[in-house]
Amino acid sequence: MTQRILVAEHEMIVAFDLCDTVEEAGYEVEGPHAGISDAMLAFQKEKPDLAILDVELKDGAVYPLAQKLIDENVPIIFHSDFESAAEVKSRFPDATTLPKPCPPSAMISAMHTVLDNS
């Protein structure tokens, strides 16, 4: 069974590039979702195997969604700009954080690592 990756990213060019990377790595993509409410609805319909989250979505900071995913044992990769990295690490010390922009090879490697360890 193909693993599902939820993608929440508000910058559409980045979002579609990320979705292409996920699909090319052999995973099923859920998204992209530009807002927390859309991503939350998708998560409630079907739990993903992993979530790739931008810190800032069109309707606010992604932290409430991230906490809900973590509470349901869904691993997360935060894909964010440099300024957000320190706050992410303080809120979610065990989460994987990748800088934006992230080379596709680094994202694929992180997805494999996180999924293998979950």
Image: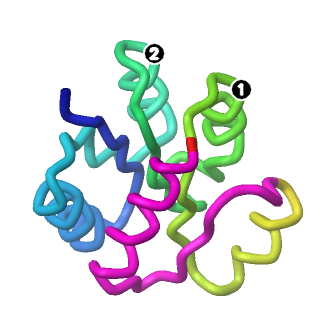
Q: Which residue is mark 2?
A: 44
Q: Is residue 95 above or below residue 97?
A: above
Query: Which residue corresponds to the image point at 40% horizontal and 30% vertical from the top-left?
Result: 48
Query: Which residue corresponds to the image point at 71% horizontal and 26% vertical from the top-left?
Result: 71
Q: How many marks?
A: 2
Q: How is the image coloured?
A: rainbow
Tell me residue 41's x, y (percent). Answer: 42, 21
Query: What separation in Å lies between label 2 and label 1 (alpha carbons)?
Result: 13 Å
Left/right of residue 95 with respect to residue 40 in the rendered view: right
Left/right of residue 109 with respect to residue 82 in the rendered view: left
**Helix or strand or loop: what does disc 2 sit on?**
helix
Q: Callout 2, which amino acid?
A: Gln
Q: Is residue 81 above or below residue 11?
A: below
Task: Examine the structure image and report whether residue 106 is included in the region drawn in magenta.
Answer: yes
Give the magenta range: 92-117
Mark 1, residues whose alpha carbon is within 10 Å: few (<14), some, or many (≥20)? Answer: few
Tell me residue 19's x, y (percent). Answer: 21, 58
Query: Which residue corresponds to the image point at 29% horizontal and 36% vertical from the top-left?
Result: 4
Q: Is residue 41 above or below residue 81?
A: above
Q: Which residue is mark 1?
A: 71
| Occupied quadrant, residue 103 | bottom left
Q: Please tell me the numbered disc located at residue 89.
A: none
Tell me residue 62's x, y (percent). Answer: 61, 48
Left/right of residue 103 with respect to residue 81 in the rendered view: left
| Occupied quadrant, residue 17 | bottom left
Tell me residue 82's x, y (percent). Answer: 64, 86
